[in-house]
Image: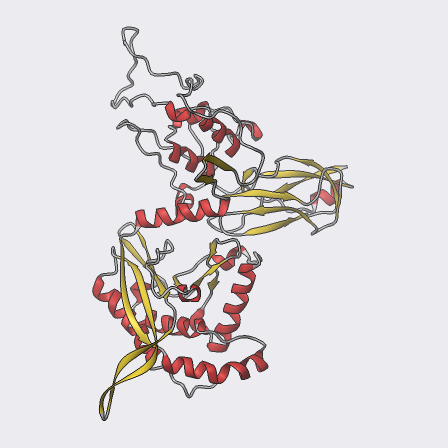
Amino acid sequence: MAQVELIMPKMGESIMEATILKWVKQEGDSIEEEETVVEIATDKVDSDVPSPVAGTLAKILYQEGDTVAVGEAIALINVESEADANEVPAIPAPQVLVQEVVAVGQDVGLAPINGSPVKTVRPSSGNGRFYSPLVLNIARQEGISAEVLDSIPGSGKNGRVTKKDILAFVRNGSQAITPPPAVVSTAPTLLTPKTSVAPPSPIAPPPTPKAKVDTSPPPPSAKKTYQTDISTEIVEMDRMRRLIADHMVNSVKVSPHVTSFVEVDVTEIVKWRNQVKDDFFKREQEKITFTPIFVEAVVNALKKFPYLNASVDGYNILVKRDYHVGIATATPNGNLIVPVVKDADHKNLVGLAKTINDLAGRARNNQLKPDEIQGGTFTISNIGSFGSIMGTPIINQPQVAILAVGAIRKKPAVMETEYGDVIAIRHLMIMSLSYDHRIVDGAMGSQFLSEIATRLEHFDTSRQL
């Protein structure tokens, strides 16, 4: 009998690790080929991992809640013969690139503590020890230096430090630790026995925590709550909310945000949609919303202002020739996900409507594939669907702009006619554009926003679907 390793798959080009949510199969269970063995989650999407062979689940190497690097074996499967095992293609372990980690908002550098320089923590340290981006991010937030991180005992495979290990270290008083000041020299420098104050040993245990530090283990629940007093309850963020928080903070750090606003008269679009929506639904079994119209106008405007369909790499501007438009979608649990309409410039309104409805529906049911939420070049957020009339959205890195469309409301407006100015009831909407001021100046941002508004106000109401 031979054994086959079940490998943590790579769910996307920037995904370096995944968290095990649930083992569908347990040790000793029979498994069919392509049958789901475990459910995993990344910072992008949740997914199932099928078995590459038929056999029996011999050993589970990681438990639920563990975060595992892609390419690592997470379970062993017994198969009947060596021939069956040899039929499984080998999956090479991917290289760990710091640049890819930074691209998804996981800053691996550590900030100085008390003015002392702190060694930057890499995914693998000088002693060959690997650290996942999640562990590195916690270390950065808690001010744990590379030397101290190397001293934390790990309970993972091959002594790897897991999320549980570093959180337990933090609870036991790691915040009281002040790392030794760095010695800057061009030659090796040794501390003599006469040195009055010696730095703490990298392998020394953490000092006794200060008063009021809770050293008791947390309750075994997915979302921990802490009652501080009668009027305050502290609820720990879930995994997705933490990732969103890190991504938003990173975006503000990376891009100097500027936001411009414009009010758009969409009365003719509202009338046209009301005329065609029933026939469209009968024919296509799909709803026609305003979003496909917005996407079409945005793509046409991007072709005129290509710097809004770009990203920044140092002092280089990467202008994208593809138009992949992300649609920010709220999930039932209150989190946010951005499915991407690929090649939006190649689709007409019918194609856009079907694609957007499909992506939005599967996003709310957690059924998106990893590649369906990657590669966006521009993002639209429809905050009007929740009643907001305007907003200042945060750029979805590494893009350089995001458009927010507010609620469509009936308002009195001044209209120019051949008989003079009149006041009429119109359907008005406020659009806001946040853009990266490193490459998009106020003039270009405002002109791009006005271009979208003009295209919407001159929408062809005679067009057929």
Q: Is residue 345 visible?
A: yes
Quadrant in the picture for the N terminus: top right
Relative vertical location of residue 447 with respect to residue 69 in this rendering, above or below: below
Whether residue 465 is visible:
no
Rendering coords of residue 31 (x, y %): 74, 46
Determine which quarter of the picture holds residue 441. Answer: bottom left
The one of 437 and 121 positioned closer to us in this rendering: 437
Q: Residue furthest front?
A: 230
The residue at 46%/58% (across/down) is: 338
| Image: 332 above or below 176 | below
Residue 449 image position (x, y, % from top left): 29, 69
Q: Which quadrant of the view contains residue 57?
A: top right
Residue nearer the viewer, 138 or 54? 138
| Front position in the image: 196 or 347 | 196
Q: Quadrant of residue 434?
A: bottom left
- Residue drawn at x 52%, y 64% is 359
